[in-house]
Amino acid sequence: SQQGEEDPQALSIQEGENATMNCSYKTSINNLQWYRQNSGRGLVHLILIRSNEREKHSGRLRVTLDTSKKSSSLLITASRAADTASYFCATEKLSGSARQLTFGSGTQLTVLP
Amino acid sequence: EAGVTQFPSHSVIEKGQTVTLRCDPISGHDNLYWYRRVMGKEIKFLLHFVKESKQDESGMPNNRFLAERTGGTYSTLKVQPAELEDSGVYFCASSQGGGQGWIYEQYFGPGTRLTVT
């Protein structure tokens, strides 16, 4: 079984529309993070939400976390063509001072101009 | 501020050869991580350094992989001998922080695409 599975795997929308991506995970976490990866580039950190938070905003991004359902959603409002990328959720489980992120398989978002 | 850099950006080697990947973290970041994404699969954690010490190497696939971070600055990841299934993108990340309970985001490099033929 996988930790951090995104849904849908691919999403295509028109510029200006909102895009919603979901992530589910299986074990208890300390925080959940969303990353973006443009084609051929590295991962860019978008937003981090702690396990005791339910919602967080950053610009056009809105992230929710439901620890009872072990799920998170990423909403991008008023999408732009430049938002076209792969989006990954990653969970972090604290174990002393050890850290590791567990990534999902990602959602490929295409925003059509 | 310079980000995480990785070298080379792309490496093509034959099965059985050795390859060494390098990662330069953001200056001042004690924490350095290696991840990899093999074809069609998720990004997987390999290991975590705190300064020069290996904090967690639970993700290292086998003893053909050797990571070092001498002096606690840059890190190298050596694959010897390389196998076909080692092909993929190897990411490095770094973060601030230390001790119990801290939470800091990890900044990722652009990755090294390794192709083993």
Image (tube, grey):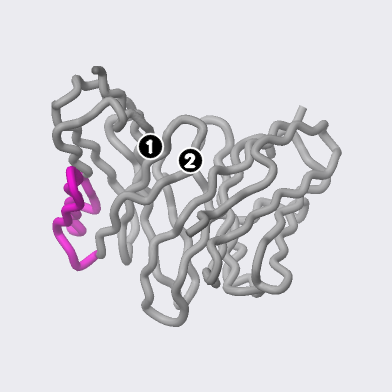
Q: Is the residue A109 above or below the residue A24 in the image?
A: above
In percent of width and height, residue B14 lies at: 82, 31
Callout 2: residue from which chain? Answer: B
Q: Which residues make up the magenta segment?
A: A51-73
Q: Residue A52 or B3: which is nearer the viewer? A: B3
Report the residue marked by disc 1: A106
- Residue A69 painted magenta: yes
Please identify the residue farthest to the right as the structure is shown.
Answer: B16
Q: Is the residue A78 above or below the residue B112 in the image?
A: above
Q: From the viewer's perspective, is A54 left or right of A26?
A: left
Q: Amino acid at mark 1?
A: Gly
What residue appears at the point 78 percent right and 41 percent down from the top-left corner? B82
- Residue B75 painted magenta: no
Residue B59 is drawn in which quadrant? Answer: bottom right
Callout 1: residue from which chain? Answer: A
Pointer 2 local density, CA inside 10 Å: few below 14, some 14–19, many at least 20: some
Residue A94 is drawn in which quadrant? Answer: bottom left
Q: Residue B61 or B87: which is nearer the viewer? A: B87
1 and 2 marks on the same chain: no
In percent of width and height, residue B53 lies at: 65, 74
Q: Which mark is residue B107?
A: none
Element type at mark 1: loop
User: Which quarter of the figure is the C terminus of chain A placed in?
Assistant: top left
What residue appears at the point 14 percent right and 32 percent down from the top-left corner? A78
- Mark 1 touching mark 2, by CB under 8 A? yes
